[in-house]
Image: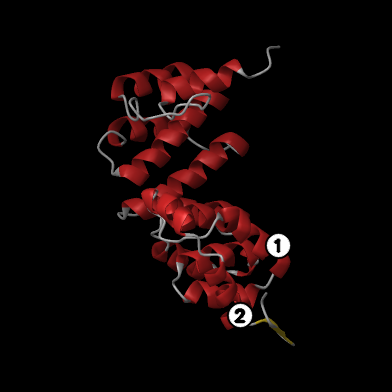
Amino acid sequence: MAQTTSEGPSLDSVMADLAALEDPRARQVNIRHGDDHGVNLGRLRALAKSLKTHHELARELWETGDTAARLLALLICRPKSFSRDELDSMLREARVPKVHDWFVNYVVKKSPYAEDLRLAWLADPDPVVASAGWALTSDRVTKNPEGLDLPALLDVIEAEMKSSPGRLQWSMNTCLAQIGITHPEHRARALEIGERLEVLKDYPTPPNCTSPYAPLWIADMVSRQPTS
């Protein structure tokens, strides 16, 4: 286990703990999803729980550039301790899908700069950065839609989603589905856009899982909503 000093666990000992968690089978599975690490995420979370919050250690782990170390950093950092510029720089470094996803969901969403960054990233020419803007927009669609121009968002999705690269397309599709699920007044248009564009229509979906194809996703989630 990590050796501790008066200032907490050392970077070297935590990196050794991560190395000990290396599992070739986990690496094979992760690589198929674009994630270049071999650590089972359940065991990674257990390590994070044992370390508790250590923001300076999290910074050191992030700076290694190692994917498993960065995932651990996101679990033990203090999201509100990062400046806006730090968050922007970190996102641009987060090219591995799982690191990108955890960074947006576990750190940026808890930051006081989330809305400012959402607007900036939506307009960014880098599609991976823009995908983070759309992920934050989806979160607002479901939790805090006041002030959002949902018809305008649907206009952009309708015009750009079909031709967008993978990760950006996925984030725009998620936003489309969430608009249809949570805003009945826009559901018919969201369904029409999804049916016409057919984005992710043929995506392989395991049994008993919800398809990411927006019309099926919307229909499935709406069917689970309580009736008044």
| Between 41 and 133, the one nearer to me in the picture | 41
Residue furthest to the bottom in view is 6
> Is residue 183 in view from this perspective?
no
Task: In the rendered view, tell whether residue 202 sits above or below residue 123.
Answer: above
Residue furthest to the left in view is 163
Label 2 or label 1, whichever lies nearer to me, is 2
Q: How many marks?
A: 2
- Measured as percent of width and height from the top left, residue 169 is found at 34, 39
Q: Quadrant of residue 147?
A: top right
- Measured as percent of width and height from the top left, residue 181 is found at 54, 24
- Left or right of 169? Residue 9 is right
Contact between labelled residues 1 and 2, with CB atoms less than 8 Å apart: no
The residue lying at 51 percent from left, 39 percent from top is 138
According to the picture, the residue beneath numbered tag 2 turns out to be 13
User: Mark 2 and mark 1: span between their CA atoms?
Assistant: 16 Å
- Left or right of 49? Residue 183 is left
Which numbered circle lies on residue 49? 1
